[in-house]
Image (cartoon, grey):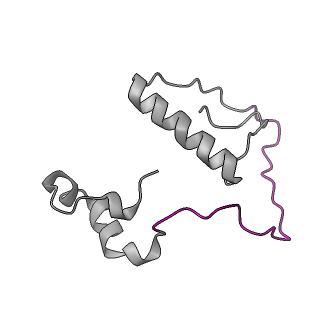
């Protein structure tokens, strides 16, 4: 996982990126580390009414070996802490 502290503020390519400028300006709004587990349960549930629309079929896109290994590591880390869980929804994202 990348955190705010991982960002090199001397990198000119990052400094010209508008997103970098926003993140830098509001860095007190971001955590330095991920929490150890999921937040407490909220009494709110939600659903999205799609009527009869079928989910869009999206295939995964190929990654180079190093980015794919990093993605797998991050997904495993998030699953082990409970911040991410497997979805059986037909509209889930292709990761």
* Residue 38 location, quadrant: bottom right
| 30 relative position to 23: left or right | right
Is 40 placed above or below 49 here? below
- Name the residue at 24% across, 56% down: 17
What residue is rendered at 27% in x and 61% in y?
Answer: 18
Q: Can you say which quadrant of the picture contains the C terminus?
A: top right
Taking the spot 50% from the left edge, 64% from the top edge, the residue there is 33
Q: Quadrant of residue 36?
A: bottom right
> Would residue 13 be found to the left or right of residue 27 on screen?
left
Decide whether the magenta segment is chiefly helix, strand or loop: loop
Q: Does residue 48 appear left or right of residue 71 in this picture?
A: right
| Picture mark count | 0
Q: Position of residue 21 (x, y in %)?
A: 27, 66
Snapshot quadrant of residue 72:
top right
Residue projecting furthest to the bottom: 28
60 up-or-down from 24: above or below: above
* Residue 84 visible from this viewpoint: no
Q: Quick check: is 91 in the magenta stretch?
A: no
Residue 52 at x, y = what percent? 82, 36
Q: In the figure, is residue 18 to the left or right of 87?
A: left
Q: Is residue 58 visible?
A: yes
- Which residue occupies the foreground of this view, 82 or 20? 82
In percent of the image, x 59 and y 41: which residue is there?
Answer: 75
Q: Nearer the viewer, residue 1 or 23?
A: 1
Q: Nearer the viewer, residue 62 or 7?
A: 7
Q: Which residues are magenta?
A: 32-54
Q: Position of residue 77 (x, y in %)?
A: 60, 46
The spot of residue 78 in percent (x, y) is 62, 48
Is residue 46 one of those drawn in magenta? yes
């Amino acid at each position: 996982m990348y955190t705010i502290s991982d960002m090199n503020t001397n990198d000119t390519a990052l400094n010209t990126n508008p997103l970098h400028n926003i993140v830098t300006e509001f860095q007190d709004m971001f955590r330095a580390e991920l929490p150890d587990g999921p937040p407490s349960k909220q009494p709110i549930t939600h659903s999205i009414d799609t009527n009869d629309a079928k989910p869009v079929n999206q295939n995964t896109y190929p990654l180079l070996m190093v980015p794919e290994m990093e993605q797998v590591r991050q997904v495993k880390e998030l699953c082990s802490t409970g911040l991410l869980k497997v979805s059986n929804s037909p509209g889930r994202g292709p990761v």
